[in-house]
Amino acid sequence: DGGITQSPKYLFRKEGQNVTLSCEQNLNHDAMYWYRQDPGQGLRLIYYSQIVNDFQKGDIAEGYSVSREKKESFPLTVTSAQKNPTAFYLCASSILTGNQPQHFGDGTRLSIL
Amino acid sequence: SQKIEQNSEALNIQEGKTATLTCNYTNYSPAYLQWYRQDPGRGPVFLLLIRENEKEKRKERLKVTFDTTLKQSLFHITASQPADSATYLCALAGVASNTGKLIFGQGTTLQVKP
């Protein structure tokens, strides 16, 4: 079955540590996205990518970095510069042409030790 | 700035009744609007899409309306069931958006009681 796989499901970060969240899709979608979800808030866009080796900042990119070396993969690194990283992180993908739905993974919950 | 508002209070209804959820937006002219369902600890799942030139869209027990004059979309679930209990998110994309980017509301939690 096609879909998006995020790993790990739960992740703990120590002070001063960078952590990387994995996102893999086998839907052959060009576009991929990373969102952050906090309680009572909507999904906020961190980064998105429309094509391999290219990505753009979303609304809250500070303290995060991404890469897009393969079409299937769009890992997100939460750096030590992100002072409030505790959140639920969601990865999504879509066909790039207009008005297409986004397909989401089941998220990674990041907490601070 | 662009703003999307969904009722932050949970909606509690009795099984069999129609649930109606609201999505209001300001400072925005969306080309289309999408509705998603999210269960606790899971990612959102796409339900319906409606374009700016469509007034209404239906899928089984679901109905979405889109009023660009009122800047509002209503999401209806008829003959609601306890299994419909979840958080429902609306999301908008603009005319110029060829990036696939969406702006999401904060979601409304629906609780259907048997």
Image (spheres, rainbow, N blue to C red):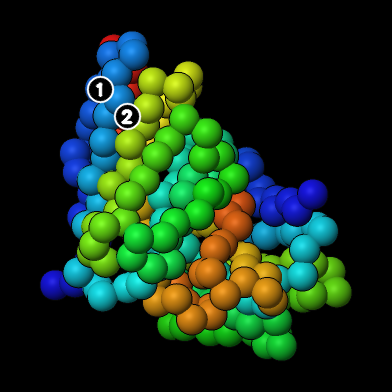
Q: Position of residue A27 (x, y in %)?
A: 25, 73
- Please tell me which residue is depicted at 58% across the width and 55% down the height of the picture: B104
> In the displayed structure, would residue B13 be above or below residue B80?
above
Name the quadrant containing residue B74: bottom right
- B61 to the left or right of B107: left
Q: Position of residue B46 (x, y in %)?
A: 42, 68
Q: Residue furthest bottom?
A: B53
Q: Mark 1 — residue? A: A12
Q: Is residue A101 visible?
A: yes
Q: Say few, some or many: other residues with alpha carbon within 10 Å of mark 2 (under 14 / 14 to 19 / 20 or more).
A: many
- Please tell me which residue is depicted at 68% across the width and 87% down the height of the picture: B54
> In the displayed structure, would residue B12 be above or below residue B62?
above
Q: CA distance from mark 1 to mark 2?
A: 6 Å
In the image shown, does A103 or A73 lie closer to the viewer? A73
**Callout 1 secondary element:** strand
- Please tell me which residue is depicted at 43% across the width and 82% down the height of the picture: B60
**Callout 2 secondary element:** strand
In the image shown, does B113 or B71 lie closer to the viewer? B71
Q: Mark 2 — residue? A: A110
Amino acid at dot 1: Phe
Q: Position of residue B112 (x, y in %)?
A: 45, 53
> In the displayed structure, would residue A41 be above or below residue B90?
above
Q: Position of residue B11 (x, y in %)?
A: 58, 48
The mark found on residue A101 in the picture is none
**Answer yes or no: do the residues labelled 1 and 2 have beta carbons within 8 Å?**
yes
Name the quadrant containing residue A76: top left
Q: Is residue B83 visible?
A: no
- Please tell me which residue is depicted at 55% across the width and 49% down the height of the picture: A58
Quadrant (top left, top right, bottom left, bottom right) of the C terminus of chain A: top left
Instruction: Say whether mark 2 and mark 1 are on the same chain.
Output: yes
Q: Residue furthest left?
A: A1
Considering only order in the chain, which callout, 2 or 1, is on the residue closer to the N terminus?
1
